[in-house]
Amino acid sequence: MTIVDQLLKDADQNKEIIHTIGANTFRIDLKPDDLKLWADTLSSREESCNLLLACAHSEGPLTETQITWVVGSAIRSLNIQAAEEIVPLLRGLGIDESVASNLPKLCPGLGSEQTWAFYLDRKGTLCASPVLQQA
């Protein structure tokens, strides 16, 4: 069973898994159209990566931008070696510590066998989708 299959078993009828973390919310989006969007985005990349981030700016250092919603964003691709590397990375992009520090346990395969995409929804909630590898 793939990581995506395992997540789908836990998803609600909207194909989402919603985690409440203190006063914040983190959402894993497993909707087929969104999974396809991220898979297409990954396949269009020339470089190998295991992390896609919807950022406000495509130019300059990553530390000088912030995570944003997908529409009109600059998708940046990165590689991380371990799930824990996501915490300071997203903290630097404006994500609350309480949410960022929980991501290594909420996103299976992060930093290893599963590529993940992170972005904000229109309400400013951090969302993530596992990215399917296309053949």
Image (spheres, rainbow, N blue to C red):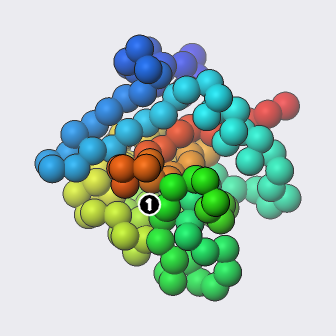
In the shown orientation, is residue 69 left or right of residue 104?
Answer: right
Residue corresponding to mark 1: 86
Q: Is residue 63 above or below residue 121?
A: below
Q: Residues within 10 Å of mark 1 (few under 14, many from 20)?
A: many
- Image spot of residue 107 (x, y percent): 43, 41
Residue 27 percent location from the top left of the image? 38, 39
Q: State left or right for residue 18 relative to residue 92.
A: left
Determine the residue positioned at 74% across, 48% down. Answer: 41
Determine if residue 70 is in view.
Answer: yes
* Residue at 61% over, 53% down: 71
Q: Amino acid at mark 1?
A: Ile
Horizontal side of 125 relative to 135 (left or right) equals left
At 61% from the left edge and 45% from the top edge, which residue is drawn? 115
Residue 79 visible in the shown view: no
Q: Residue at x 52, y 28 (%)?
A: 30
Local SS, label 1? helix
Residue 104 location in percent, x, y? 38, 49
Q: Quadrant of residue 40?
A: top right
Residue 84, image quadrant: bottom left
The answer to whether residue 20 is left or right of residue 120 is: left
Q: Nearer the viewer, residue 72 or 18?
A: 72
Q: Residue 24's spot in the image, x, y percent?
A: 22, 50
Q: Which quadrant does the N terminus fall into?
A: top right
